[in-house]
Image: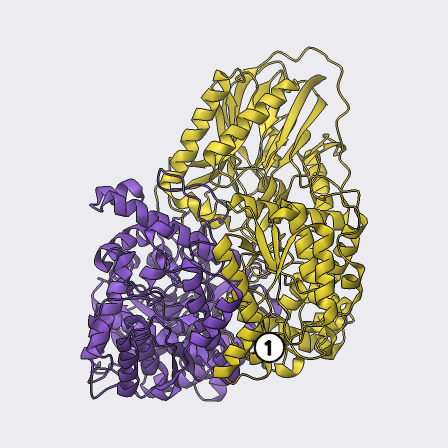
Chain colours: A purple, B yellow
Amino acid sequence: MAQLRIALAQVNGTVGDLTGNADLIVEWTRRAAGRGAHLVVFPEMFLTGYPVEDLVLRKSFVDASIETLDATARRLADEGLGAIPVVAGYLDRRADVVDRVGQPAGAPLDAAAVLYEGRVAVRTAKHHLPNYGVFDEYRYFVRGDRLPVLRLHGVDVAVAVCEDLWQDGGPVTVTREAGAQLLVVPNASPYERNKDDVRLELCARRAREAGCALAYVNLVGGQDELVFDGDSLVVSGTGELLARGPQFAEDLLVADVELPDAPAEFESGETPADAHDGTTITIERVLLSSTPVPPYPPETPPCAEPLGDLGEVYGALVLGVRDYVRKNGFRSVILGLSGGIDSALVATIAADAIGPDNVHTVLMPSRYSSEHSITDAEELVKRQGIHARTVPIRGMVDAYEAELDLTGLAAENLQARVRGNILMGLSNEHGHLVLTTGNKSELATGYSTLYGDSAGGFGPIKDVPKVTVFALSEWRNAQTAGLPPLVRASATPPIPQNIIDKPPSAELRPGQLDTDSLPPYDILDALLDDYVEKDMGHDALIAAGHDRELVERVIRLVDAAEYKRRQYPPGPKITPKNFGRDRRLPITNRWREIAAPHTPDPARVDTKQTAADT
Amino acid sequence: MAQLRIALAQVNGTVGDLTGNADLIVEWTRRAAGRGAHLVVFPEMFLTGYPVEDLVLRKSFVDASIETLDATARRLADEGLGAIPVVAGYLDRRADVVDRVGQPAGAPLDAAAVLYEGRVAVRTAKHHLPNYGVFDEYRYFVRGDRLPVLRLHGVDVAVAVCEDLWQDGGPVTVTREAGAQLLVVPNASPYERNKDDVRLELCARRAREAGCALAYVNLVGGQDELVFDGDSLVVSGTGELLARGPQFAEDLLVADVELPDAPAEFESGETPADAHDGTTITIERVLLSSTPVPPYPPETPPCAEPLGDLGEVYGALVLGVRDYVRKNGFRSVILGLSGGIDSALVATIAADAIGPDNVHTVLMPSRYSSEHSITDAEELVKRQGIHARTVPIRGMVDAYEAELDLTGLAAENLQARVRGNILMGLSNEHGHLVLTTGNKSELATGYSTLYGDSAGGFGPIKDVPKVTVFALSEWRNAQTAGLPPLVRASATPPIPQNIIDKPPSAELRPGQLDTDSLPPYDILDALLDDYVEKDMGHDALIAAGHDRELVERVIRLVDAAEYKRRQYPPGPKITPKNFGRDRRLPITNRWREIAAPHTPDPARVDTKQTAADT
């Protein structure tokens, strides 16, 4: 058996920051060398960041990526780190194809390279391109068709990229044919609720298919609407979990693995192999070093405990907010504090993400605001040490009403829009990023005002159903001891219990309660999950036990709100996954899931609506 | 030689309106039969509308499409129209593939069928899938691999779909091998400026490649941010233009074509053929009728004159507005009228699109509004007979300023946002669709206020550079005789000359002019076209003769505005093509085209900015 110490650099880079990301490659390689690692692996497209979207179509950006990669190889050698092979993702292009209609301009590749002894020892690129859900990679990349196999200390190490693990055939199949002892896989795999279990099972299955150990290194950090969770891992050739990194935090996961010896003979060069997906992949064998590592006592590899469901969600939200703020060059945020649970949770997440001193809140009471909405908000401000000011909206609302005769929903919207203006005005004046506070249940059903409470740059809980808002608030209140770097320690629970306990209300008319117009949130959220996330149709929803009348009402609300959202894009990006992006629906459309035709009237469905209003 | 009278039904359907579109198929087939046509061809996916985006991933929608197609075939026969073959685009699925990761759910097909004698005689589907620009078809469809060849009155007619014309290899190549005499191609090809010349050249080239005449039928109508322009045409096997339909209007283009006789023998069945694009296509021969049409005197086919460049652009804008309003169930629009040229042109387009009685305008003077801004707007209202009311904003602005101390840009934004609130309030109260009035030059450079002048459902001139705004206004003023159905006749030029002649100003501070912060529009627009549309980089722009300092300033402005637009989505859809959609840039990104790093500060770049402000 051969030994190898591999280091998985689960690092948080920034899209487009080639210099900064190259610095991170050097810094983390130095740390890996300090730990005695024989191989370092960085995440997918780490040098450029991921996803870079339409930047890949700019020639100057592809040039910059390739040049920076070469410079990084030289720099590693210059700084005495040339002897440790570094697997780094970057952006490259195919030189052997000409531009044609239907192919991404410049033939970009989602590439990975091995940097060794001051040079790029080998280059490869992702073979399977994801083009579903949040991925659009047929727009951006052409397919790679190589599998590098590096002889390193007497072990054959193959390199595949991210999606190559998720689809059948391709590099994993060819890895078995190539007889490698280790498959390393740089990834940029976004967090989804419950995905970690899927990921471990997948790695175990693919390791068995490839017939060798598998090292999976994942990106960590927030990037626009996506949050990458880390959770890197190593499994043996039989699929046994050997090592696992933490979630939502940077980490150098160092693991000693015992691997079968490679055959003594080795021949550099290229061999074509059937990829069993209708394509041919060229195995490219490269000799780095044939001498095995002298035997050494292995360390027990770390195996991080998963955070648990609510901890993961909360961690994703904190990291998503922190990185969106930081990577966009902001230092502070501003949000409206209503005294309700949504804005209370968003303020708490923001305080955990960037510190309470960078969180600015505005209380904007109206004639309909209850006494407790102010006192509860003030208590939250006091417990967390965030900034607050009060701006009553009555005078502004009166000024509009002096000129316009608005009634019903139009009058309710006006209050929300005045609040949106105040926040945007303070943002423009002082440079804070505006956070919105809408949750997924109310956004899905259209219970929100365009240019009002939806005005802002980032919506931390836009993809969080209301029942989860309650659960996260309870969960966070229980973490008074803290959970660095995601949760601050606090003397008291940060969210006053009355905010969690009182019935939700928008307070846009006297005595209004959410339950006036919506069913209880546990019933609503279960239905929304089946309709929006599982994409079940009308008949399937009823067969699953949902009330027929409620199904039809909620389908109407959701469809109207979705078309509305596309018609008047509502504002903030979200985390951990973009509610709007996964469903792309034509606006001028007459087809509806339910029998009764329902043409949304976009001027009418944009606020705090009731079933009667639609 | 054989004769055939073909009818190209250049019709305006509605996405999702299966029943309404099926009605149109029957109605226009009846018209074609009345004209003695032997074959009718409808546009791509006409039965479902195009593009249907994520609706194709819903099983219930695909089922409905297939069922409606079958019912339409029966209905045509029931109504005595079974003897005329009807080529109709619809949505189908591949039954022979199982769902897997990386393939669109349900394996949808961008299909076309021939309806004949109460049945679906043959089905096919688009082979080449466009996945660039505004197209995302790898997300939606799997590839078709058949070429139907119908023996009709002794002529062999092949059917291909839209993109199959644009890419090399595939159905066109196989059409030659199949020895067809006519290739009919249903299309849904959106309007782009100057595309009509490209389209005719393409059809002529592909006809020569296929070795036969080619009938190209294109959709007409507005669908969200796209406008389909019709412009259907027929070319001979040598590429000569035989017939051409109008632009931006429905039409039944009837053309008598003389074609070589097909070989006397005919064998139904399937033959595989090399598609010369790495795939195999199955030729499917189907006998409809072997008897040639008895000789008849051919009619001279119509050949519509192109509208000319400005006429085309204006036509696209009128049809885009009309269909967005109508297909979304609105009857009226509302917009702010500043007395400037942008809102004047938008009001004029709207009046042409839906009639002046359905156009509501609001004059919203501030303390900085000039006298002429009010009198010019009033003159425009009078000339066009549109509705107008005046709502001074001073009281509302004062009410905000009593509570908030906003300066500079924040104070300018406030005025724009108060106006946005007024329009949205009136929209909510009265059910008008809000039109925004921003042009492409100011939106590209960030000269716009979020939730202010960008608040609205549809932005007719969002993709129109300022120089074209002037040119369109002059062009429209010259069309007093009208150009139905796109331009109304008018006694006087609809736009007062002073609106065209005076220097542009946002009037958000005393004496403000656009030229205070931007270069002259002819210089700016030429540079924007090279940077945004042609995607030229920094060095290429300077090499093309643009001033270096201006290049760097404009790149900074555009990049900041683009990131801003993605960060705070600004609101309206646009026509004729979506400015934002073609450039998908990651927000949290540190890469910039120009050497000097420039991190946009999104709270600072969202309004009437000057170079100094960024």
- Residue B280, compared with residue A422, is above or below; it is above
- Residue A98, compared with residue B147, is above or below; it is below
Q: Which residue is mark 1?
A: B412
Residue A532 position within the rendered picture, expressed as x and y whole percent measured from the top left: 33, 53
Viewer-side residue, B382 vs A86: B382
Residue A89 position within the rendered picture, expressed as x and y whole percent measured from the top left: 45, 70
Quadrant into which the N terminus of chain B falls: top right
Q: Residue furthest front?
A: A402
Residue B583 position within the rendered picture, expressed as x and y whole percent measured from the top left: 57, 62
Viewer-side residue, B177 vs B90: B90
Quadrant into which the C terminus of chain B falls: bottom right
Q: Quadrant of residue B148?
A: top right
Chain label for disc 1: B
Circle 1 Cα neighbour tier, 10 Å, few/some/many (<14 / 14–19 / ≥20): many
A570 relative to B476 in the view: left or right: left
Residue at 51%, 51% in the rendered image: B136
A485 relative to B45 in the view: left or right: left
